[in-house]
Image (tube, rainbow, N blue to C red):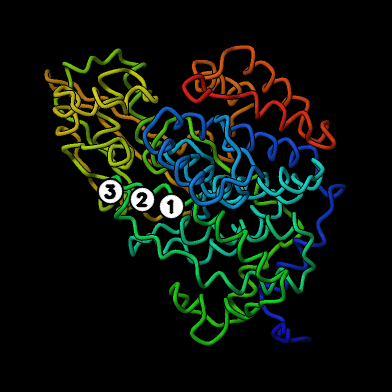
């Protein structure tokens, strides 16, 4: 028997968000929102394929095949279909492995945390492109609104808030795909107390558990939505209730203040338009110092052999959380290290997938440069955060010459990449794995937009043909 659902003024924040998510219609989405949703799917595919040659993808494929071999949904890049929940879990974890996926600053990695669940249901059950695009936009919206009030405090405590919050977005996306009404979706969100705690340690260490910070939210979201659909209900007051999620997340204000914060401007803007993309395969907070350094290297023709010291100034949490100086045992650990990223970028003049290969991780020249990277917290940059995030970098040459510069986070909402930028990233990742012809089909597909493929036959047909050569 289903748990009774409160009515009237006590419906809760989750119910208000569920009303919005369930009421969203395709006709409500502007061309800019539709284009952004398409770019998020295209970029997520590239981020996933970037990890497919690795050990982790092979292990996850074996896991999914063993747990549920029912051919319901595709493991992207592999000639294999498994259960929808397992496919969503594996595709989400793989998408997050190389740190190339999108996100919202102090929000979460909504793409890798929810789009795999949405697409797995679309493939299993049959769905229109319009359903998928609305589900994606709704997932980003609700996930971001729940995360933003708590993320800075969680970050300060060493909690990987995207891992903890991703299941909110996945629950909304799955709920939309399953046709839940607002009452049922709010009850599904009432299970988000079961999401992972998600400490940062697995990222620092380079454990595979870090990748599941996007895989597991997809897994949870599908289960939460299915539980509610079956009549097993969580509480719509879970967020603001006594000793509820807001309390656990460190909220210090009143319930009314939280409600106002979460629901402010609901329906007047779309969180997906605040999504950033990643030009570098590493933690987002490292991108600003990398961009500043590469700009200096290009502008002043700085040679790695001439560098005596690299000074980085940024908000204090960067020095506390992202300044592991090695030794670097694996790529995930290196992707969370400013010294490594700057050392590799200075030596190679770029920072891409090849800079995180094993041969580079153990390169003595990279390690020597990483050891010359130093951090100083900057009061002005701290005060500007989180409204703006900037990093200052200065390079001191062996002859005493100093060059300095500053950068914001590249490819963010203030200066988003265009279609050509993301198509270029897509090609760099996908062409060596699947060939130029497949890449050309995909870029043409996304240029037209998923909405042009009404029943998604073209999408899933192309997806099943986009098999990495080593997995064929």
Q: Which of the two labelled residues, at mark 1 and mark 3, occupies the earlier sequence position?
A: 3
Q: Is residue 313 left or right of residue 192?
A: left
Q: Label 3, on which residue?
A: 204
Task: Decide which of tag 2 and tag 3 comes sooner along the chain.
Answer: 3
| Percent position of residue 401, x then y | 18, 21
Q: Is mark 1 on a helix, strand or loop?
A: helix
Q: In this view, does 432 lie to the left or right of 38?
A: left
Residue 439 vs residue 310: left or right? right
Task: Name the mark nearer the viewer: 2 or 3.
Answer: 3
The residue at 59%/52% (across/down) is: 85
Image quarter for residue 181? Answer: bottom right
From the viewer's side, name the closer residue of 87 and 168.
87
Dot 2: what SS?
helix
Q: Where is residue 395 in the image (x, y as percent from the top left)?
A: 23, 27
Residue 66 visible somewhere in the drawing: yes
Which residue does the numbered mark 2 point to in the structure image?
380
Q: How far apart are marks 2 and 3 (CA)?
A: 27 Å
| Residue 384 numbered mark, or none | 1
Q: Where is residue 50 in the image (x, y as percent from the top left)?
A: 47, 29
- Residue depicted at 62% across the width and 81% down the height: 237
Look at discs 1 and 3 and give the one toward the viewer. 3
| Disc 1 + disc 2, Cβ < 8 Å | yes
C-alpha span from label 1 to label 3: 26 Å
């Amino acid at each position: 028997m289903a748990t009774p659902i409160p009515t009237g003024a006590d419906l809760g924040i989750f119910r208000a968000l569920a009303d919005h998510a369930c009421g969203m219609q395709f006709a409500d989405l502007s061309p800019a929102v539709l284009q952004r949703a398409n770019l998020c799917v295209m970029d997520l595919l590239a981020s996933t394929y970037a990890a497919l040659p690795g050990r982790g993808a092979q292990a996850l494929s074996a896991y999914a095949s063993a747990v549920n071999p029912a051919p319901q949904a595709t493991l992207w890049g592999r000639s294999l279909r498994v259960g929808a929940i397992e496919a969503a879990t594996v595709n989400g974890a793989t998408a997050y492995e190389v740190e190339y996926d999108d996100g919202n600053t102090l929000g979460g990695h909504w793409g890798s945390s929810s789009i795999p669940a949405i697409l797995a249901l679309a493939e299993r059950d049959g769905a229109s492109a319009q359903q998928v695009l609305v589900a994606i936009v709704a997932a980003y919206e609700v996930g971001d609104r729940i995360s933003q009030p708590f993320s800075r405090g969680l970050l300060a405590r060493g909690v990987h808030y995207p891992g903890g919050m991703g299941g909110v977005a996945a629950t909304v996306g799955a709920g939309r795909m399953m046709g839940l009404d607002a009452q049922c979706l709010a009850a599904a969100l009432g299970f988000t107390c079961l999401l992972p705690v998600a400490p940062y340690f697995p990222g620092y260490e380079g454990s595979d558990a870090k990748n599941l910070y996007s895989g597991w939210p997809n897994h949870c979201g599908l289960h939460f939505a299915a539980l509610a659909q079956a009549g097993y209900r969580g509480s719509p007051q879970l967020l603001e209730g006594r000793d509820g999620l807001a309390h656990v997340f460190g909220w210090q204000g009143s319930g009314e203040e939280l409600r106002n914060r979460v629901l402010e401007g609901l329906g007047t803007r779309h969180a997906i338009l605040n999504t950033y993309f990643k030009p570098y395969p590493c933690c987002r907070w490292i991108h600003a110092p990398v961009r500043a350094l590469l700009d200096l290297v290009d502008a002043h023709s700085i040679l790695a052999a001439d560098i005596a010291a690299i000074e980085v100034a940024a908000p204090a949490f960067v020095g506390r959380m992202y300044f592991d100086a090695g030794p670097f045992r694996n790529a995930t650990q290196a992707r969370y290290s400013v010294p490594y990223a700057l050392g590799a970028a200075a030596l190679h003049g770029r920072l891409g997938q090849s800079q995180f290969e094993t041969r580079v991780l153990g390169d003595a020249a990279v390690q020597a440069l990483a050891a010359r990277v130093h951090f100083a917290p900057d009061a002005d940059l701290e005060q500007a955060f989180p409204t703006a995030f900037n990093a200052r970098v200065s390079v001191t040459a062996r002859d005493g010459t100093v060059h300095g510069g500053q950068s914001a986070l590249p490819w963010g909402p203030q200066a988003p990449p265009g279609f050509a930028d993301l198509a270029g990233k897509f090609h760099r990742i996908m062409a060596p794995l699947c060939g130029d012809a497949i890449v050309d089909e995909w870029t043409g597909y996304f240029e037209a937009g998923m909405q042009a493929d009404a029943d998604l036959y073209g999408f899933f047909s192309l997806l099943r043909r986009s098999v990495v050569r080593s997995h064929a």
